[in-house]
Structure formats: structure tokens, C-alpha cells
Amino acid sequence: MAPRANTTLRQRRLGAELRRMREQVGFGGSELGRLVGMSPAQVTQMEAGKIGISVERLRTIAATCMCVNEPLIAALSGIITEREKPGWWEEYRGTLSDDFIDVAEFEGQARRLTTYSMAFIPGLLQTGAYASAVFAQAVPPLPRHEVDLRTAFRMQRQRLVRSGATPYSAFIHEAALRMQFSGPAVLADQLDALIEDSGQSTISIRVVPFDVGTMPSSSENFTYAEGVIPELDTAQVDTSLGARIFDAPAHMARFRSLLARFESRALSEEETREFIGSIKKEMESKRE
């Protein structure tokens, strides 16, 4: 079987979990290959998501690696047997970078999404005007058609949470609520949209205000995606060089710890609506 030219996020995650199985029992790639009838090159390609395997092969590998986590094995079997049509994001492959495609797939496969945003309103809650203003701030500047393409892609991503298909929680730092990317008018409209979104039963929005005191946190905006089982939870972090995906147990424990602290210190949903409303009034007074 020829290696795949393009791998999906879930194919790479399957490979990563197989690599973890192998490493936890202390096998090298060559040793695992010898035990299950694969060449070292095939093991490497499998763990990179470049080639597929059958459910039978998965179970052979799991048994060889002494993995007795049946829920994990069943979840990985589900990835192998999926025969869904390509996600909507595949239409953009070749016109947007793989980072954009990975983020959309990451969100599309989640059972629940939680974000923390410090620099700007979370992408899944941005208005079109606000999103366009954010993309227009890129350095070096993007051509207008690139700004429009990225904005359209972001708006399409939002259907996931606005439809109620995926429960969504957003922790937003006060700094993000006050950042003006295109003046007070655009921000006021964005804040109004946040208040409206917060009324949906499947969307929770909570603000982390400046005056909570010391707030241990990540310096980056990040999204935590719950998988079909906790072992398949994943996190995505925004960086100046693009999106990074994390799935190592140590990283996931850190993100869970951060979210627990936000949960305990952020304003309630009702307090958040009032808080956002007060900033919205400030912005409206500035545009008059």
C-alpha cells in the first residue's frame, strides 16, 4: 500500500496512540514489527498516519503491547472503521494552509469544546466584521482576497456551535473584550453578539476579569476538545507561527488544571452578561 500523500488529523492521532502503546511497553519500532509481522518502515509509516491498518491488526498490536484498555482499543477501532464522507473543510485544502484544515477537523470531531482566549474574542464567536479585522492585522499584511477567504472559513466553522451540535464553553479574559481591532463600533457589535450567543443553552460564556488577582494561566489562546473517551482528548494552541495540536497525557493534565482554575475564578454566566454589557456601553459612547 502506497503511503498517503495527505494525512488527516484523526489518522495522525491513531498513529500517535499506536506509538504510545509501543513506547509504554518499551519496544522499538523494529521489535514491534518483528512481533506483528511488519517491516520497520511500515511501523514508522503507520505511526505517522501514512498507512492504514485493519481492526484485526490493531488488536494484534494492542495485545502484543499488553494494552488492556478496552475503551481505548474500541475508540481506535472506530477511527479505523469510519466511512464518513470528507468533512466540509476538505473543500479548502490547497487554498488554505494545513493548520486551518486541522483546526476545523479538530473541532468537528470533538464531543465538547472549551476555549480560553486572552488576546481576542474566540474565533467560534466572532462576527464577520471582527474576524476580518483580526485577519487584516497580520504582519506582513494579507491580500484582501486572503482576508476574505479566511473570514469565510471561520464563519463556516461556527456552524458547529451555533447549531447546538457541539456544546461549547468559552472563558474570555477581560483583555480580549477590550481589544479593538477596527475601532469601537466593530467591537460594540461584537460584544452585542456575545451577549446574544450567551443566551443559547449549548453555549456558555464566562469572563475572567482583571480584578480576580493572580490568575495562573497560559499566555496563549487554546481550545480543549473532549474526545469519545478521555484518553482521546486533544488541545489546540494558537501561536504566532500557526496552530499546534497537543495530545500527550502530561499536556492534557496541564490544560485540565488550567480549565479547573478558570472555572473556579471566572464570573458566572449572568455576571458575565452584565459585565460584557457594561463594556459594550463604553464602546457605544466612543463611537457616537
Image (cartoon, grey):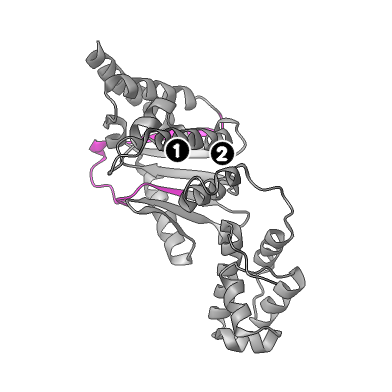
Please name whichever residue, 227 or 270, is drawn nearer the observer in this view of the structure.
227
On residue 167, which mark appears? 2
Can you say whether 220 is above or below 127 in the image?
below
Foreground mark, 2 or 1, reads 1
**Outermost residue, top side:** 288
Q: Which residues are magenta?
A: 201-223
Residue 121 image-quadrant placement: top left
Please name whichever residue, 217 or 180, is drawn nearer the observer in this view of the structure.
180
User: The N terminus is located in which quarter?
Assistant: bottom right
Query: Which residue is tagged 1?
Result: 150
**Residue at the spot 67% in from the left edge and 74% down from the top edge:** 68
The location of residue 190, given as percent across then percent down, is 38, 25
The location of residue 285, given as percent across then percent down, is 24, 13
Can you say whether 8 is above or below 165 in the image?
below
**Residue at the spot 48% in from the left edge and 36% down from the top edge:** 154
- Circle 2: residue type: Pro
**Residue at the spot 55% in from the left edge and 35% down from the top edge:** 161
